Image (cartoon, rainbow, N blue to C red):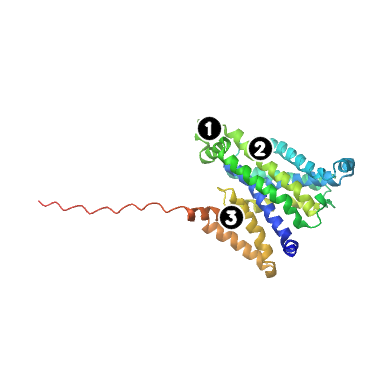
């Protein structure tokens, strides 16, 4: 068992991490909003943790709190992501469709350029030697952080879907004008979903900085936005398990096929193409359709009796 953890532990952790990032995009999609801002908040959370855990200005606080400092980084990252999510979401969510996607991509690029030019973020080099939490000696041990976080997020998502807020989000996704006419405030609920996704991405970023032991501007890029979107599209955007399955699959396939060298990237691309063509509702959506009972067959029309003159 220890050999398995040492060999595949980091891969398992990154699969769970990808699922969490997919879920951060899943929440805005519940309100019909295509937001690609997840890598921006993920990078913000990572920089928050890296600065608090390495900057000499916070040495006294680190000595006082000990391992509690890691928990503090999650809370600070969540708060900053929520505030920035509000600042970005209120004006940006007035846009729809591709225009919202472009606006959130621009947000990610703005954060990346700022990170490249600020001294506190280490510029283009980034921040190194981020300490490990709770005495972890192997990166596979981070499953004790990411695993419970995934379970809590899935539980929260399930409860949200069954609540009045979840019903309002679905109503906005299906028909925003009809939802507005029924008394649902679309702007408020869309901003709420956006902020929930931002907070989740920020916390995952704060947990990931110690995992990677370093943090730089490459963590929040346009490529990362497309990767997170692929997690949701391949897994399925209408079920909470879709982003988890898609993130795990698209993370695992390139690593498990590493022995094929560059061909593994070709196979990964084929998986994306095939899934997009033949599984338009994602893998989880296709499995749900298989589980549903077939609709009852309509009985054939009986022949009409002939009327003799």
Viewer-side residue, 65 vs 234:
65
**In the image, residue 73 lies at what x, y percent?**
79, 43
Task: Name above or below for residue 295 compared with residue 180.
Answer: below
- Is residue 99 visible to us here? no
Left or right relative to 159: residue 56: right
242, above or below 183, in the image: below
Q: Nearer the viewer, residue 276 or 74?
A: 74
- Quarter of the figure with residue 87: top right
The residue that disc 3 covers is 234
Expressed as whole percent of the image width and height from the top left, the position of residue 184 reads 55, 32
Q: Earlier in the sequence, mark 3 or mark 1?
A: 1
How many residues crowd mark 1 within 10 Å: few (<14), some (14–19), many (20+)?
A: some
Cα–Cα span, label 3 and label 1: 31 Å
Label located before the other in sequence (1 or 2): 2
Which of the 4 image quarters holds residue 74? top right
Q: Which residue is mark 2?
A: 89
Mark 3 surroundings: few (<14), some (14-19) or many (≥20) residues within 10 A: many
Marked residue nearer the N-terminal end (2 or 3): 2
């Amino acid at each position: 068992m220890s050999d398995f953890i040492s060999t595949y532990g980091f891969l398992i952790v990154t699969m769970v991490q990808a699922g969490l990032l997919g879920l951060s995009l899943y929440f805005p999609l519940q309100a019909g909003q295509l937001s690609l801002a997840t890598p921006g908040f993920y990078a913000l959370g990572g920089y928050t943790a890296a600065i608090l855990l390495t900057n000499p200005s916070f040495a006294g606080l680190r000595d006082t709190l000990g391992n509690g400092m890691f928990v503090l980084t999650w809370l600070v990252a969540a708060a900053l992501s929520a505030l920035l999510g509000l600042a970005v979401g209120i004006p940006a969510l007035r846009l729809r469709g591709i225009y919202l996607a472009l606006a959130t991509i621009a947000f990610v690029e703005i954060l990346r350029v700022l990170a490249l030019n600020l001294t506190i973020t280490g510029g283009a080099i980034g921040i190194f030697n981020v300490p490990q939490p709770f005495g972890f000696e192997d990166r596979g041990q981070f499953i004790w952080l990411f695993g419970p976080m995934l379970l809590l997020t899935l539980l929260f998502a399930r409860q949200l879907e069954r609540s009045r807020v979840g019903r309002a989000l679905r109503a906005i996704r299906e028909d925003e004008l009809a939802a507005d006419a029924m008394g649902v405030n679309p702007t408020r609920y869309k901003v709420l979903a956006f902020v929930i996704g931002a907070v989740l991405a920020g916390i995952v970023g704060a947990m990931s900085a110690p995992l990677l032991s370093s943090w730089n501007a490459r963590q929040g890029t346009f490529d990362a936005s497309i990767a997170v979107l692929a997690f949701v599209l391949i897994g399925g955007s209408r079920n909470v398990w879709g982003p988890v399955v898609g993130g795990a699959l698209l993370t695992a396939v390139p690593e498990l096929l590493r022995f094929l060298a560059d061909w593994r990237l070709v196979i990964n691309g084929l998986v994306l193409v095939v899934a997009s063509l033949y599984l338009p509702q994602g893998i989880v959506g296709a499995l749900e359709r298989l589980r549903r009972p077939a609709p009852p067959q309509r009985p054939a029309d009986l022949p009409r009796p002939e009327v003799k003159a």
